[in-house]
Image (cartoon, rainbow, N blue to C red):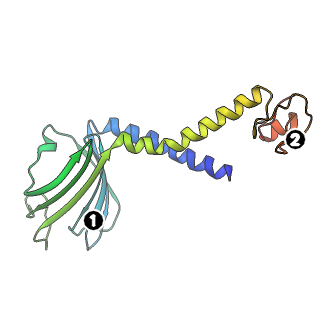
Amino acid sequence: MRWMFRVVAGISLMLCAALVGLRVRAVWVNDIVGCGGPAGSWSVQSWHWRLMVSTSNVPSDSRLSWYPRRVTPGDEDSPAFMHTGWNRAGFVYLDVRSPPMPDVWPRPGVAMVHDRYLGMPTLVVAGVFGVLPGVWGWGWRRRRGRVAKGLCAGCGYDLRATVGRCPECGRAFGVGAARRGDGGVIV
């Protein structure tokens, strides 16, 4: 069970680092990853320090695609025709309805474009992904401190007068246990 926690914590740490990098990159480039089908499309994008998830009623091809788009001043103020939503503490919800603009983006067969956006600050998402690695690091540090003080890595029992196994929890310690990675004390 511990190995599974370590794997999940490692993946979570990589996602946390990727999100921090994405936040820095979002100053210059909006990255959009999207996929769609005949009923509509969805996308995840970095947009002005936020991670945005969007859905649209516009049909598109079903392949997964990535669009890096250069950020231009005034991008965030682009006009929407019927625009409702909220923006509180960096969390955003937008409901945008507009007529199709064939000169900008051809959308055949669509009478009204309906897009929904839900966004949150990138660092909030990175913080959520950083919880598991933080818990793992805290536990690792605690076990390491116990071993250095001559205590059992599992339960904290004083092992200075004990040989072989912890009388409290039964965990093996000593030179062989330390080599196996059991967190034992090297005598």
Taking the image as shown, residue 100 lies to the left or right of residue 174, namely left
Quadrant of residue 89 within the rendered picture: top left
Category of crowding for the residue at label 2, using alpha-carbon neighbours closer than 10 angstroms: few (below 14), some (14–19), many (at least 20): some
Which residue is drawn at the image coordinates 43% and 41% (left, top)? Answer: 127
The image position of residue 55, as x and y in percent, is 26, 62
Give the residue at the far top of this rendering. 149
Q: Position of residue 155 (x, y in %)?
A: 76, 40
Quadrant where the C terminus sits is: top right
Quadrant position of residue 117: bottom left
Residue 80's place in the image compared with 173, above or below, is below
Alpha-carbon span between mark 2 and mark 1: 60 Å
Q: Nearer the viewer, residue 27 or 140?
A: 140
- In this view, the residue in front, 98 or 107, is 98
Rendered residue at 70%/35% (across/down): 143
Is 16 placed above or below 161 here? below
Does residue 123 appear anywhere in the picture?
Answer: yes
**Which of the marked residues, 2 or 1, is nearer the chain's N terminus?**
1
Give the residue at x 88% y 40%: 165
Is residue 32 shown to the viewer in this render?
Answer: no
The residue positioned 45% from the left and 42% from the top of the image is: 16
Provide residue 59's location: percent of width, then percent of height: 23, 70
What amino acid type is highlighted by mark number 2?
Pro
Q: What residue would you read off at disc 2? A: 167
Three-letter code, disc 1: Ser
Q: Is residue 173 above or below residue 69?
A: above
Instruction: Determine which quarter of the picture holds residue 40.
Output: bottom left
What number of labels is visible? Answer: 2
Q: In the rendering, at what x and y percent does residue 179 appear?
A: 82, 37
Residue highlighted by disc 1: 41
Query: What is the secondary structure assignment of the residue under circle 1?
Result: strand
